[in-house]
Image: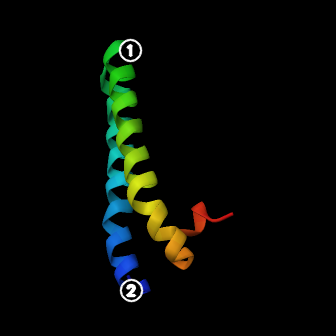
Amino acid sequence: MNQRDAAAIAAPLEAAIAQLSKALLEAEARLDERALESFKRLIGIHVGKLSHELLDPIYDEHPSVMPEGLRN
């Protein structure tokens, strides 16, 4: 995959993680403690999968595509 394609694929995945993070903020304001813990666990699983299984391989091949905040 070339760098342009890597960036085009990574961008919506990064946006999906951002949206899941926003959903978590909304859940924190609205759910009871038990429901929130379950929600947090599920969000964590999905963010982890998006990051580890999809974005990490892209970033490994094209480090310049990685957002500034994630760089060492």
Task: Quadrant for residue 58, please give it.
Answer: bottom left
Task: Name the residue tied to disc 2.
Answer: 4
Task: Quadrant for residue 45, please give it.
Answer: top left
Q: Secondary structure at mark 1?
A: helix
- Residue that appears at 35% across and 13% down: 34
Observer-nearest of 22 and 37:
37
Q: Position of residue 2 (x, y in %)?
A: 40, 86
Rounded to the nearest angstrom, the CA distance separating label 2 from label 1 is 43 Å
Query: Of the residues under marks 2 and 1, which one precedes in the sequence?
Result: 2
Observer-nearest of 57 and 35:
57
Q: Residues within 10 Å of mark 1 (few under 14, many from 20)?
A: few
Task: Name the residue tied to disc 1.
Answer: 33
Inspect the image, locate mark 2, and give the three-letter code of the amino acid beneath it: Arg
Does residue 44 lie above or below 52 as drawn? above
* Side of 13 where 59 appears, left or right: right
- Residue that appears at 36% across and 37% down: 43
Q: Secondary structure at mark 2?
A: helix
Q: Position of residue 27 (x, y in %)?
A: 32, 30
Which image quarter is the N terminus in? Answer: bottom left
- Residue that appears at 31% across and 21% down: 31
Q: Position of residue 52 (x, y in %)?
A: 45, 52
Which of the two discs, 2 and 1, sits closer to the camera? Answer: 2
Q: Position of residue 9 (x, y in %)?
A: 32, 72
